[in-house]
Image: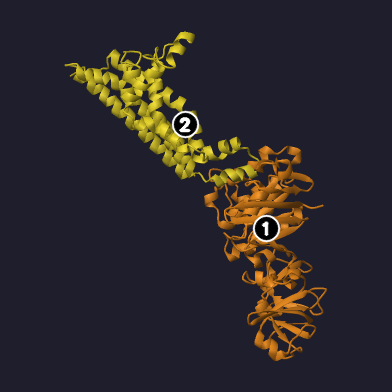
Chain colours: A yellow, B orange
Amino acid sequence: MEHWFVFSETEMSAIGLSFKIALCCAILILPIAILMGWWLARKTFRGKSLIEGFINLPLVLPPVATGFILLLLLGTKGLIGQFIYEWLGIRIAFTYYAAVIASMIVSFPLAVRAIRLSIEMVDPGFEEAAKTLGASTFQSFIRVTLPLALPGIISGFVLSFARSLGEFGATIIFAGNISGETQTIPLALFNQIQIPGMESSAFRLLLVAVVFSFLAMSVSEYLVKKLHKRN
Amino acid sequence: MHALSAHLKRKKGDFSLDIKVDFIQGITGVFGPSGAGKTTLMHLLVGLERPDEGYLKIEETTLVDTSTKTFEPARNRKIGYVFQEGRLFPHMTVRKNLLFAVKYIQKEKQVIEFTELVNLLELNNLLEKRPKQLSGGEKQRVAIGRALLSSPKLLLMDEPFSSLDVKLRRQIIPYLIKINRKFNIPMLVVSHDLPDLLSLTRELFLLRNGRVVGHGNYLDLLEQENMLELMRGAGLMNVIQFKVKKHDNENGLSILSNKAASEEISIEREMVLDCCQIGDEMNVSLRPEDIALTLAKIPNISIRNQLPGILTKVIQIENRNYCLVDVGFKLLVSITHASLLKMELSEGKKVWCLFKSMALQTNI
């Protein structure tokens, strides 16, 4: 019983890695998702629904299939990956970077959706007003739209963070299950469940996963409520 | 020199707008029913919409000219625009809203000073509040202040009264007149409410179905064919400028004079109380329905104001007659057709205009 709450080295590395990958993923996604969310919220153009469909594809595609597509594209023998490997000598698949990329692809639609909805809620009239007062499109976005859409941007950030914490299918295909390199909490959990006698380790990882996800969601809820009150 | 001159064309579905406007200093009103193209016109002037064809000049600067493919975006136009709904930024305090445009103006080009404006619009106690804590009238004042602090060459206002109740309207009008006088900024005010507009200005553009159907002084417009009919539904009004001559506190009256009129008139003291002192000019409004016509002065009657004049024009619309009477200035009087026949009124006849002190309302 006394070993139930002592984390092993593998577990600690999985927890640390999960956190690092999730944070990297959420930070890297944010600017792209804001740009894309604004574009989809404010512009109308031909083929818009095609682009929306493409972005949302990872939401409905089995993550394993997403991982497989990534492998076909970015693997060392992949469509793009072979050139990156040959010319730059960089291997992406089965590395830490692959884990981040896999997380980003599956979280992206969630972040875009949250941010886009919140930008749609901002009356474009405020941007018009800013422009008549001398602001450029970019300035009116930064000074007016962005602060007003902040609740949605925060939830976009937290959603992609949380989604990345839970990412399994695409990661295991594209990044593998390498301890200390790509083995995040869900992958480690998957390992421990399969090995007899590792129930306590599985339990600890489960607990951490629940606490992390719960904290992320409640912090975002709290911030969003506070911001709504302010505006 | 024109403050603004423009000829703009724009087609939107079934609606087409083809408007030529120009005006000089002072306040100019744009009046038209909803759907006449008032807001489209504003958007074209301020740069939120592009015309299909036409030009726009402010002072001598060309901002839009489709023939040379010139199109200055809204932010470079130096036109202050007060939106119908105010559009104050909800995440900023009143102070930050007011100062929004200051970043985009070089210091030496700043025409209006912050403290001066805050004092003029009486915004001192509101500066740290957020827009949602403000009343409708306060919001409107902040929106006007924000537009003015962008140091505009011209101020456009879209239905500045529509979101305010009657009492607040009377409060905002003096501010607008003060701004126009103090900063010498030409103003274009759009409204579908004629009495409100007339309390600000008598220079009007009448809009109908995307076209200017009349332009000029309100009273001159009334004499033009069909104009009366166009304006009738909006509530016709006489707006006359008087000088406060003396107060008769004993009887609760104030005496006003107009140098063109032969007689002085009296108004309820409390109407003058909170706006003007002796010697001040003030605008007084009077509904055409509240004036009666007689053929002679009537000595024993409770109606205090009796002005002699010449009936210059009679316009019949259905069974009502609108009579323009020159009493020194022009008064619009509305009487029934039956009265006209009974009194044998015709153009050129001498008449007396009678109205009660209580029928007079002050605008400033």
Q: Residue at x 74, y 76 (%)?
A: B331
- Which is nearer the eye, B94 or B348? B348
Are discs 2 and 1 both within one chain? no
In the image, residue A121 above or below residue B350: above
Q: Give the structural element (helix, strand or loop) at label 1.
A: strand
Q: Position of residue B141 (x, y in %)?
A: 63, 54
Disc 2 packing (10 Å; few <14; some 14–19; many ≥20): many
Nearer to me, B115 or B166? B166
Instruction: State the residue position of label 1.
Output: B189
Q: Which mark is residue B64?
A: none
Question: Tag 1: Cα neighbours inside 10 Å, few (<14), some, or many (≥20)?
Answer: many
In the rendered image, which residue does mark 2 sit on? A33
Q: Chain of mark 2?
A: A
> Which residue lies at the image location 41% right of the left edge and 25% below the top edge?
A104
Closer to the camera in the image, B219 or B253 = B219
> Which chain does tag 1 point to?
B
Residue B116 placed where, x, y %? 71, 49
Q: Where is residue A210, by image quadrant?
A: top left
- Look at the image and tell me whether residue B217 can be seen: yes
Where's residue B168, x and y in %? 60, 62
Which residue type carries mark 1?
Answer: Val
Question: Alpha-carbon distance for marks 2 and 1?
Answer: 42 Å
Query: What's the residue at 69%, 56% (across, down)?
Result: B19
The disc labelled 2 sits on which kind of residue? Ala
Q: Is residue B104 left or right of residue A163?
A: right
Q: Is residue A165 left or right of residue A81?
A: left
Q: Is residue B80 visible?
A: no
Q: Quadrant of the N terminus of chain A?
A: top left
Q: Secondary structure at mark 2?
A: helix
